[in-house]
């Protein structure tokens, strides 16, 4: 069980490191948006607030890189920062058109990250709740009513989210099952090796003792 837990921790760190590099890519994209005034206005970013929040994201992303391997604390910190990323994404999507925002596909990326790092029902809920929240803000902010295009977008992204969750969770379960089988086989091999070593020692003791006794009998008969 200890080996399996260690393997799961290593897998989490490897996937969390992948998340960090993806964040770096998104931060580079965000920097371009901040540097182009027309893009910033399109995303609803005004004044120094956008730069300040950008620095906050960069800081907690960097911190996450250094604490991701610290057991339970690293997992909790990663989960919290991912939810902060979701809040930022909600603001950017709503400010740039809600259901018709060009940034809506990024929601699928975060579903992928949550499913990879936290493949449990409670861990996957936050990114799945993003679509109804954005749909609510779409009605609240733009007040344009649901049209066929909006319904199609909701259904389309919902299906894609379910496919991503199913594939990642299924592969994670298969991976864990294979790891458990490997651990079980390794344990059996160790037990078999110990058993064979005991048999070898027993044979050596038996043969050595038998030869010694035979020699003693022959010498006694000779005397």
Image (cartoon, rainbow, N blue to C red):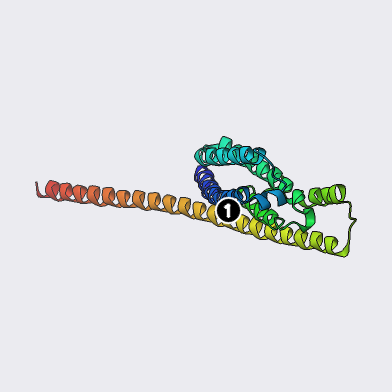
Q: Nearer the viewer, residue 44 or 78?
A: 44
Q: Residue 165 falls in which quadrant of the image?
A: bottom right
Q: Where is residue 215 in the image (x, y as percent from the top left)?
A: 16, 50
Q: Position of residue 50 (x, y in %)?
A: 65, 41
Q: Mark 1 sits on what residue?
A: 176
Query: Farthest residue in the front direction?
Result: 37
Looking at the image, which residue is at 23% across and 49% down? 208
Image mark count: 1
Query: Farthest residue in the left direction?
Result: 223
Q: Residue 147 falls in which quadrant of the image?
A: bottom right
Q: Using the rendered image of the protein, determine whether residue 25 is visible from the camera's viewpoint.
A: yes
Q: Where is residue 65 in the image (x, y as percent from the top left)?
A: 52, 42
Q: In the displayed structure, does residue 146 sit left or right of residue 107? A: right
Q: Which of 212 and 151 is in front in this view?
A: 151
Q: In the displayed structure, does residue 205 sit left or right of residue 26? A: left
Q: Is residue 155 above or below residue 71?
A: below
Looking at the image, which residue is at 73% across and 45% down? 91
Query: Which element carries disc 1, helix, strand or loop?
Result: helix
Q: Nearer the viewer, residue 187 or 84?
A: 84
* Mark 1, other Cα within 10 Å: few <14 / some 14–19 / many ≥20: some
């Amino acid at each position: 069980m200890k080996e399996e837990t260690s393997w799961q921790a290593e897998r989490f760190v490897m996937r969390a490191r992948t998340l960090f590099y993806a964040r770096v890519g998104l931060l580079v994209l965000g920097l371009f948006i901040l540097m182009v005034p027309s893009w910033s206005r399109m995303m609803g970013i005004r004044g120094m607030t956008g730069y300040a929040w950008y620095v906050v994201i960069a800081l907690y992303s960097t911190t996450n890189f250094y604490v991701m391997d610290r057991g339970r604390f690293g997992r909790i910190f990663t989960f919290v920062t991912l939810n902060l990323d979701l809040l930022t994404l909600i603001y950017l999507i709503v400010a740039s058109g809600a259901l018709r925002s060009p940034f809506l596909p990024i929601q699928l990326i975060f579903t992928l990250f949550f499913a990879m790092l936290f493949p449990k029902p409670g861990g996957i809920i936050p990114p799945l709740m993003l679509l109804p929240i954005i749909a609510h803000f779409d009605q609240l902010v733009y007040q344009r009513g649901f049209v066929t295009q909006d319904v199609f977008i909701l259904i389309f992204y919902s299906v894609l989210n379910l496919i991503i969750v199913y594939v990642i969770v299924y592969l994670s379960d298969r991976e864990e099952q294979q790891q458990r089988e490997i651990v079980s086989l390794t344990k059996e091999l160790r037990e078999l090796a110990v058993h064979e070593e005991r048999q070898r020692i027993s044979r050596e003791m038996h043969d050595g003792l038998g030869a010694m006794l035979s020699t003693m009998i022959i010498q006694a008969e000779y005397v």
